[in-house]
Each structure stands twice: as structure tokens, then as C-alpha cells.
Image (cartoon, grey):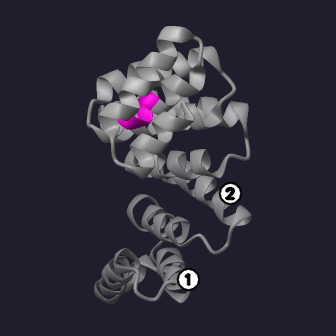
Amino acid sequence: LTRAVAKGVHLGDLQGALADIDAVLQMDARQHLAYFNRAVLRSGQADYKAALEDYDRAAELAPNQVECVVNRANLKVEFLSDPLGGMADYDLALQIDPEYTDAIANRGLLRLELNDGAGALADLDQVLKKNVSDVQAWVNRGVAKMECLQDLDGAASDFDQALRLQPDNAYALQNREIVREALKTNPSRT
């Protein structure tokens, strides 16, 4: 299995890596890491349905592997147009490990996409309690405040904080300008 990962990740030999993983699974079909690694490789090849099957099998064999559940959620949200399935997996991941920051952050982003501003804000607040230097969490929280909660002053503050941490963050710059223009044209929304 180590050789397969080396082939796929370090040498770019995806077909060789997949062949090695298939050989491992022929010897022992209960190797959850083999399914997990094959799912990662298949995702990289845009074979999303096969990747989902492998993540499902890996999660079945090792139900407490939070990274597998989060990767499966990401796959559902990003490539399979299944936001509710993704949300269920983020929730499951947080049942396994309530402190798993990637699951919290990704669920917050999904909640934002689903126009659940309060839920997004709660998740992003939790991420920022763990890491006040998380630029993306500041930006996403600013977007939640701007788009879902109409809290333009709060959004501007979050974008400013993101820019203090990363002055060239294009998304924060763009959104801060949008907020500034909105405040100029409609000062009663402050």
C-alpha cells in the first residue's frame, strides 16, 4: 500500500498505484486504507462515482475514520451535487470527532451555500476560536454576514481582519469593496 501511495502521489503513476491497490484488495478486501487511497486517486481522475463507492466501503470497514467521512462529504458537495448528503457526512464526522476543524469549516461553508447564515456563522465562529489566523474562515464569515445576515458592518470587519492577515487576498478585497459600496449607497443598513 505504501508503494501505491508513492507511485500515485510522488511519481504521478496513477495507473500503477491503482494496480497496486487492486492487488492489495485481492489479498485482503478488508483493508480500509486501500479503499480510502483508491478513492483519493479515483477522485483525482474525476471518476467520482467509483470514488464514492470506495469511500463508502472504507467508512463501512472503519466507521471512526473521520478523514474518510469528510472526504466523502467533500466529494458529494463538490462533484456529485449532493449537498444534503454532504451535510449528513459533515454531521457524522463531527459526531466521530467534534473538534475536527476541516469538518466544521466545510460544514460552515456548505451552510453558507445553503443560505443558512446563522448555522454558517456558528461553525465559522467555532473555527476562529480554534485558529484566529484562519484567513478563509474570516472571509467566509464575512460573506455569511454580508449575504445571509445583512450585517454589513460585521462583514466589513471580518474582511478587514482577513486582509490584516493576508493583504493580497483577492476574495476579501473584492468583498470588502462590495460592502463599502453597499454602505455608501444605503447607509441605513449599517
Q: Quadrant of residue 93?
A: top right
Q: Answer with left or right where residue 134 lies relative to residue 6.
A: right
Please indicate whether residue 109 sits to the left or right of residue 185 in the image.
right
Q: Residue at x 43, y 47 (%)?
A: 9
**Foreground pick, 69 / 123:** 69
In this orientation, does residue 29 appear? no
Amino acid type for the residue under numbered disc 2: Gln
Q: Residue drawn at (51%, 29%), measured in percent from left and top?
A: 36
Whether residue 174 is visible, yes or no, is yes
- In this view, the residue in front, 135 or 43, is 43
Magenta span dominant secondary structure: helix
Q: Residue at x 26, y 36 (%)?
A: 46
- For mark 2, does the 10 Å Cα neighbourhood hold few (<14), some (14 to 19), or many (20 or more) residues? some
- Indicate the secondary structure of the residue bearing disc 1: helix
Question: Which of the numbered marks, if any, corresponds to residue 126?
Answer: 2
Q: Position of residue 16 (x, y in %)?
A: 35, 33
Disc 1 marks a residue whose amino acid type is Gln
Give x and y (percent) for residue 92: 62, 29
Quarter of the figure with the N terminus:
top right
- Picture coordinates of residue 178, whole percent (x, y): 31, 79
Is 126 situated above or below 28? below
Q: Label 1: how many residues lie within 10 Å, few (<14), some (14-19) or many (20+)? A: many
Q: Which mark is residue 161?
A: 1
Q: Is residue 103 placed above or below 154 in the rendered structure?
A: above
Magenta residues span 38-42
Q: CA distance from mark 2 to mark 1?
A: 16 Å
